[in-house]
Amino acid sequence: MSLEAAIDPTLPTAIILFDGVCNLCESSVQMVLKKDKKAYFHFASLQGKTGQSLLQVYGLQGNDLKSFVLIENGVAYTRSTAALRVTRHLSGSLKWLHPLIILPTWLRNGVYDLIAANRYRWFGKKNECWLPRPEWKNRFLDQS
């Protein structure tokens, strides 16, 4: 039994936690929604109740919103490892990014950290979390 199932058996097996006010993160979530033909992934913002609860359960920093988090089958992955694990479930050319996971973690996370540190400056930021289109709403865990 996965850790999140022990906490809440209704949680899906693949959850992406993302920065809900980041334009780059929003675009990435929309891209995953379009390329995830099997609706494998579900989503929660890092700022939301579910996101904060999952961060706490997995011992991740609740106030560090720079990380992309994938919780898959009871294991939490962060930063470049999370992003690359997501690509293997997507359709199209993005699937071909997954083999980059063989690169050293320090190298992958170095690139990831550079983008994360500059994402608001380069891509912008919203004052409020993005709201999904109605047909995607059931894929989001915090529906307020």
Image (cartoon, helix red, strand yellow):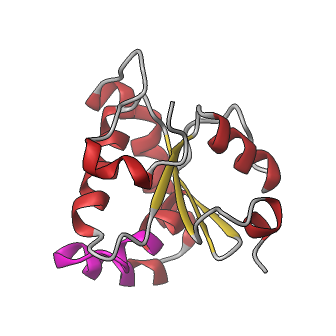
Tell me the residue at 32%/40% (across/down). Answer: 132
Residue 39 image-quadrant placement: bottom left
**Residue 123: % across, % down:** 27, 31
Residue at left offset 26%, top offset 74%: 37
- Is residue 29 within the magenta segment? no
Q: Residue at x 28, y 30 (%)?
A: 122
Q: Is residue 68 left or right of residue 119?
A: right
Considering only vertical position in the picture, is 82 above or below 99?
above
Question: Which contiguous range is marked in magenta?
Answer: 85-99
Q: Is residue 55 above or below residue 23?
A: below
Image quarter of the N terminus = bottom right
Nearer the observer, 74 or 12: 12
Is 62 left or right of 123, judged from the image as shown? right
Decide whether residue 89 is among the magenta residues: yes
- Residue 41: x and y in percent read 44, 65
Magenta stretch secondary structure, dominant: helix
- Left or right of 6, for residue 52: left
Occupied quadrant, residue 98: bottom left
- The residue that appears at 46% across and 48% down in the rendered structure is 140
Farthest residue in the left direction? Answer: 92
